[in-house]
Amino acid sequence: MEKYYLAVDIGASSGRHILGTVREGKLVLQEIYRFDNGMKQQDGHLCWDVDSLFYEIKEGMKQCRKLGKIPATMGIDTWAVDFVLLDGENRMLGNAVGYRDDRTQGMDNKLYETISLNDLYRRTGIQKQIFNTIYQLMAVREETPEYLEKGESFLMIPDYFHYLLTGVKKQEYTNATTTQLVSGETGTWDYELIRKLGLTERLFGELSMPGTSVGPLTKAIEEEVGFTCQVVLPATHDTGSAVMAVPLDPNGEDSVGDLLYISSGTWSLMGTELPKADCTMESMEANFTNEGGYDHRFRYLKNIMGLWMIQSVKKELKEKGEAYSFAELCQMASEEVIPSIVDCNDPAFLSPESMIMEVQNFCRRSGLEVPKTPGQIAAVIYNSLAACYGNTVKELESITGRTYPAIHVVGGGSNAEYLNRLTADRTGRTVYAGPGEATAIGNLLAQMLAAGEFESLEQARKAVYRSFAVKEYKPGN
Ligand code: LFR
């Protein structure tokens, strides 16, 4: 009898249910369900529709029943930083506002009235992103302070779904670090900071590591989906899961710090792993963050605007009646020669009305050739991303004092051949692309590790290497 595990991996633009099993030392996956996601305007804010996401989670679970493949355990991962507040009767206080909403505008200055940016970095190791939970909580404190007073539970989005499934509230560590309220040193909530900010202390309970059992499905959910199983925490921050699934050559060693990866999806998260957080000012100035990972490793990385830029352009063109696939956009881009490079991390690209116009405006402002056709726009975006990767490698090498001969690109974006070639060229490193489903795989690995299928993350990463095809791109080819 094969033993199945279920990963529910929800990204900013889509979600999927993937069943996994281990067969002769290899991972075997089956995608059983897929659904769309996105932020929508609700009561004047950009929000996630958590009710419809939870409906989709259950619909996907029903597929297991239909297929007769009942998972022993399941776990959910999503993007980071967003949360819900629940009252004493477990009702949501307000909506699940999304990180691209502009409610955090000016909240940085509000926050610095209490603590300086430098001190915040020294304590948490988390890089400033205006959408981090800490700034969102400042916005709640300003706009609806009663939510903090009435709030009995603070749950990150995956914690909330796990609660709806089991009735048990757990706060998972990897995602909690993205709040910017967890100490980089102790790996627990920074209560001094929480108190200083006037945030309700009771909202921040014990943190749980990936691999922790949450509990069985509630009776009501069991009846609805037609089976029961245990919920086990993965690294609930999708990037934490994705980086767990970076393949490791079976002849190699998993020494922390050797890897250079890009987790490529809506965002490109580029970095390495560190055994300890680097909370120095040099690190802060270079814009690197220390996100908590499996086994208390740190993902030392940089957020790069990523494929969001091209996703937005694709959507915009479709609305204008010009529908192209990603493959077509890549193909058109590869036929263009346009030297313009934009700074992908310019805040103008975070949540623009029109991405096309923002890219054009950036070029105009900077005296660069302004792209006009869809192919030119796509070419500027892809080349700019690759250029940003090139700079990031240099910065990372200068900070860590190491050289990284190769880059592992994992996640959905690893299928973009054109971008992989540009990445190899602009970084001068060999690119290993794949697996594309790294996030779901990492989610499964945490569950499989908890079940004893693998002894260590190192062994699990070697299994990833054996199980999935990885494509190699050499610079200059
Ligand atoms: C990627 C990701 C990033 C995080 C961003 C916002 O999906 O989780 O790691 O910085 O989304 O939550």
Image (cartoon, helix red, strand yellow):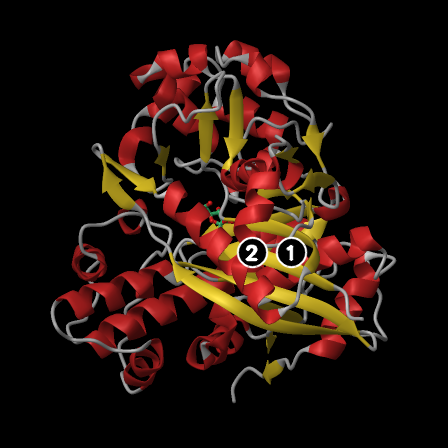
Q: Where residue 443 is drawn, which disc sits there?
A: 1
Q: Is residue 460 left or right of residue 371?
A: right
Q: Nearer the viewer, residue 200 or 166?
A: 166
Q: For the residue carrying disc 2, how many other residues have a C-alpha within 10 Å: few (<14), some (14-19), or many (20+)? A: many
Q: Where residue 469 is drawn, which disc sits there?
A: none
How far across and down, in percent of the image, does residue 211 sit?
A: 75, 46
Q: Are marks 1 and 2 in contact (CB under 8 Å)?
A: yes
Q: Amino acid at mark 1?
A: Asn
How far across and down, in percent of the image, does residue 350 sit?
A: 32, 48
Q: Nearer the viewer, mark 1 or mark 2?
A: 2
Q: Amino acid at mark 2?
A: Val
Q: CA distance from mark 1 to mark 2?
A: 8 Å
Q: Is residue 370 left or right of residue 351?
A: left
Vertical order, 43 against 427 (above or below): above
Q: Nearer the viewer, residue 180 or 74?
A: 74
Query: For the residue labelled by badge 2, is the local secondary structure a helix, a strand or a loop?
Result: strand
Query: For the residue labelled by badge 1, is the local secondary structure a helix, a strand or a loop?
Result: helix
Q: Quadrant of residue 276?
A: top right
Quick check: can you spot residue 455?
Answer: yes
Q: Where residue 8 is drawn, which disc sits there?
A: 2
Vertical order, 55 against 336 (above or below): above
How far across and down, in percent of the image, does residue 434 sit?
A: 59, 74
How far across and down, in percent of the image, does residue 144 sit?
A: 32, 16
Q: Quadrant of residue 45?
A: top left
- Earlier-in-chain disc, 1 versus 2: 2
Q: Which residue does the image show at 57% across and 37% down from the upper left? A: 159
Q: Where, quadrant-wise, is the N terminus in this rendering?
A: bottom right
Q: Nearer the viewer, residue 190 or 276?
A: 190
